[in-house]
Image (cartoon, rainbow, N blue to C red):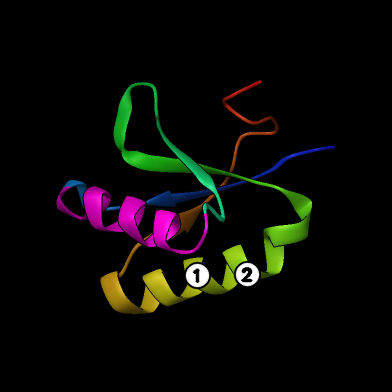
Amino acid sequence: MDMLVRSIKVDRKDIGYIRWCLESHDGIANPTTRDGHNNIIDLTIAPDFIADAEDLINALVEELGVEKIESPERSPFL
């Protein structure tokens, strides 16, 4: 199964809240901060959850003003 990656740039103070949102949605994505960039979160998402994850990311963009950015080609977990 190919995992998909989406990345967002966040205010560091919001990282805990974002992690909580992901966990409260049944682990919709696995977040990790990017090496050397502690304000960028790479979200690894299973293909079956991509639509729900995109909806959640869009809600975070509106609620917190996070910024969608270019994602790495591969999951940081691989």
Instruction: Determine the residue positioned at 30% across, 52% down.
Output: 10
Q: Position of residue 73 (x, y in %)?
A: 70, 33
Residue at mark 2 to residue at mark 1: CA–CA distance: 6 Å
Within 10 Å of the Cα at label 2, are there few (<14), some (14-19), or many (20+) other Cα atoms? some
Instruction: Determine the residue positioned at 59% across, 63% down.
Output: 53
Position of the C terminus, as image quadrant, is top right
Whether residue 14 is in magenta: the answer is yes
Main secondary structure of the magenta stretch = helix
Total numbered labels placed on residues in the image: 2
Residue picked out by circle 2: 52
Three-letter amino acid code at disc 2?
A: Asp
Q: Residue furthest right?
A: 1
- Marks 2/1 in contact by CB < 8 Å: the verdict is yes
Three-letter amino acid code at disc 1?
A: Leu
Q: Is residue 30 left or right of residue 75?
A: left
Whether residue 34 is in magenta: the answer is no
| Span of residues in magenta | 13-26
Q: Is residue 52 left or right of residue 9?
A: right
Helix, strand or loop at mark 1: helix
Within 10 Å of the Cα at label 1, are there few (<14), some (14-19), or many (20+) other Cα atoms? some
Residue picked out by circle 1: 56
Q: Is residue 35 above or below residue 7?
A: above
Q: Is residue 8 left or right of residue 2?
A: left
